Image (cartoon, rainbow, N blue to C red):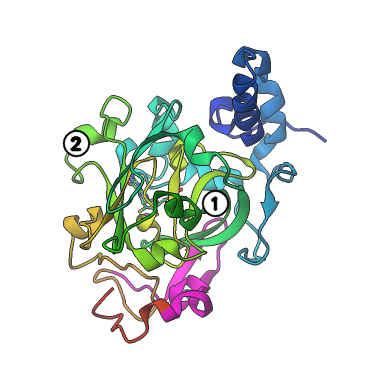
Amino acid sequence: MRRPPTGHIAPSEITPAEVFLSRRKLIAGGLAAGALAVGPHAILTAHADGAPVAPPPPEFKRNAQYSVTEAPNSLQDISTYNNFYEFGTDKADPHENAHTLRPRPWSVTVAGNAEVKGTFTLEDILKGLALEERVYRFRCVEAWSMVVPWLGFPLASLLQRFKPTANAKYVEFTTLYDPRQMPGERYAILQWPYVEGLRIDEAMHPLTILAFGMYGRVLPNQNGAPLRLVVPWKYGFKGCKSIVAIRLTETEPPTTWNRAAPGEYGFYSNVNPDVDHPRWSQKTERRIGEFRRHNTLPFNGYGDQVAALYAGMDLKKYY
Ligand SMILES: Nc1nc2c(c(=O)[nH]1)N[C@H]1C(S)=C(S)[C@@H](COP(=O)(O)O)O[C@H]1N2
Ligand SMILES: [Mo]
């Protein structure tokens, strides 16, 4: 039985990824983009009630090796309970306000210690990259968690194209700065633009992805369209949204939350139940949509795959 959609997800937020991608093909082939207009009705019925949608289209294979088997949160949960301070500090604000972001056309500037640098369109970035679905655990430093079926590609496969030099020890990511599109940037709640960083080996790790979509569709604006970082063994704030610049640096880049509160948020931000936040415990987490709390796992459950990156490091000091 089909029920009317109860969510508030605007059709513009859920352009099917296949429509975006095939539109590119058509434009390349000289056809008008308008020929592919998809009615809001067709899109909404696919997401009625915010329930998990149809399986991803065949060109996006799920990467089982890098996916957890836990049930994903609903699209409704993932797209209405957000942190994106550029659109307000309440969890519901980004969903309500992020319609002012224009994720297309978009470009990303690559700079720093790399042989190949410059400004690339989103289409250039995506060209030749195989999109994969990866179901990852997501743990916010505020002690809530979700399971998200991202659609993306390993960051390493993109970085390799830019041929990082031997001096590229870290990677810095920067969010768009445009107060007209991101009204929260008019207020000094954080130092804008939002910046985050990884050590180069963390950036090159096969679990680190740039996400372009979720649930087989392009990202809703509030989740960081059109391209955002996802590092599943770290707290969610490492996942810089709406990225416009990637810089390969020799020294550890400053990061937004570390600048705002250095005693609370470190550069590494690895999920660690044994290092409490100064104001709350990190031992357990509330899975959004459930009542029972889960125990938080070291490295968010990805320890087998990533603990070696930190061999010999005191993770209480480098939190
Ligand atoms: N530019 C930017 N990126 C950001 C944030 C932000 O406020 N601005 N919030 C971070 C935090 S604290 C979290 S938990 C995740 C939330 O991602 P989600 O809304 O897709 O769940 O985004 C991270 N990336
Ligand atoms: Mo977060």
* Residue at mark 1: 153
The crowding category of the residue bearing disc 1, from other C-alpha atoms within 10 Å (few below 14, some 14 to 19, many at least 20), is many
Look at the numbered disc 1 and say if its residue's Cβ is closer than 8 Å to ligand 1. Answer: no
Residue 187 is labelled as 2
In the displayed structure, would residue 256 be above or below residue 142?
Answer: above
For mark 1, give the secondary structure. Answer: strand
In this view, which residue lies farthest toward the right? 1
The verdict on residue 304 being magenta is yes
Q: 127 left or right of 163?
A: right
Q: Quadrant of residue 224?
A: top left
Q: Could you tell me which residue is drawn at 78 percent across and 33 percent down?
A: 2
Q: Mark 2 vs ligand 1: CB under 8 Å?
A: no
Residue visible at 54% across and 31% down in the picture? 13
> Spatial distance from mark 2 to mark 1, Cα to Cα?
33 Å
Q: Quadrant of the C terminus?
A: bottom left
The one nearer the camera, 272 or 176, is 176
Report the amino acid beneath label 2. Answer: Tyr
